[in-house]
Image: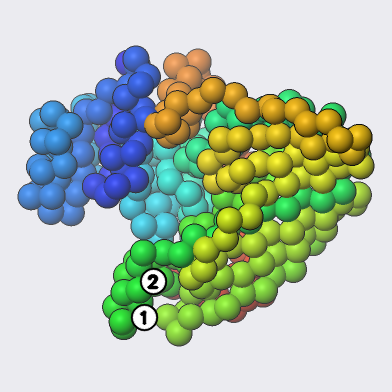
Amino acid sequence: MVRFGVVGTNWITEAFIKGASHHMDFKLAAVYSRTEERAAKFADKFGVETIFTDLEAMAKSDAIDAVYLASPNSLHASQAIIFMKNGKHVLSEKAIASNSHELGDMIKTAKDNQVVLMEALKSTLMPNFKAVQENLDKIGPIRRYFASYCQYSSRYDKYKEGIVLNAFNPQFSAGSLMDIGIYCIYPLIVLFGEPRSVQANGYLLESGVDGEGSLLLKYDEMDAVILFSKITDSTLPSEIHGENGNICIDKISSPEKVEIFYRDGRREDLSRKQLADQMFYEAEEFITLIQQGKMESKNNSLENSRITMKILDEARHQMGVKFPSDH
């Protein structure tokens, strides 16, 4: 049994708890919020008695073994380090940190304290992503990876009214690249490793974060094209192009249908059954690592998180997006 504390009481935390609850060894043991009222209300919903409004107290508590962080991106590093220094395992929402400097500190703390640190990016742990991984060789030499994730944010209407919520606030290390673009970048790194170069373009909002953008990444024998946005929608699927065919992925952020279209006209459906509560898979991976005494995930490895963060840093630099946490 792994006893979890959660930091953050928003919809994503609820989705995580719902997904993780399918695992027989998951136990929600404590809830943190800055206000006692919000913590109590959230804990009540899930029948949890232990609440905290003090992170240090929660980190030192014997009530939990691990923590799921769903706070704003800018808080992930400082919060994770508090928990890891107290021997707690950390599953941090993506993006795992604001920049490479913060992530370096987090990785060092995890290693020094022999605890698991993992980025909670669900898609790369889902059965349908693993189907892509296991069938890549069927499409021959790969020449292009194309991923698109454009989703008009419900908070953008407020932004246009002059109300800047967390999602569009550089104080919280936000923006479309950090919140949405990462869903396109991380799978690329898991499948193909670090690119040789990155070119980035983006549209900056007056608040200082990017509303939308695109990346062109160069590899020795292929390239990658990535589109992301929080101010427009897109219905485009994502694809991996090989000389013998292409793999079509319906949604790069949560793959449900995966198909190969061969050049000779054949089609092969690679789709696998998976739970509707998709966050189960990241919880399962994290719990397994803890129980087996392993320090990091194969797909969501610290190295893959490090390379992804390096790309995010470079892309932001080229687009002109600066966060207060940047050094």
What residue type is disc 1 on? Lys
Looking at the rendering, which quadrant does residue 167 occupy?
bottom left
Q: Say if mark 2 contacts mark 1, CB within 8 Å.
A: yes
Residue depicted at x 78% and y 31%: 267
Residue depicted at x 39% and y 71%: 156
Residue 291 vs residue 193, the one in the foreground: 193
Residue depicted at x 36% and y 80%: 160
- Left or right: residue 155 versus residue 245 is left
Q: In the rendered image, which quarter contains the N terminus?
A: top left
Q: Position of residue 174 (x, y in %)?
A: 44, 65
Q: Position of residue 256 (x, y in %)?
A: 56, 35
- Is residue 82 something that shows in the picture? no
Q: Is residue 18 above or below residue 27?
A: below
Q: Position of residue 269 (x, y in %)?
A: 70, 28
Q: Is residue 74 above or below residue 287?
A: below
Which element carries disc 2, helix, strand or loop?
helix
Which element carries disc 1, helix, strand or loop?
helix
Furthest toward the front, the residue is: 265
- Left or right: residue 31 versus residue 117 is left
Q: Is residue 297 above or below residue 95?
A: above
Measure the C-alpha gap from mark 2 to mark 1. 6 Å
Residue depicted at x 83% and y 31%: 266
- Left or right: residue 161 versus residue 321 is left
Q: Position of residue 68 (x, y in %)?
A: 35, 38
The residue singled out by tag 1 in the image is 160
- Is residue 23 something that shows in the picture? yes
The residue singled out by tag 2 in the image is 156
What residue type is disc 2 on? Tyr
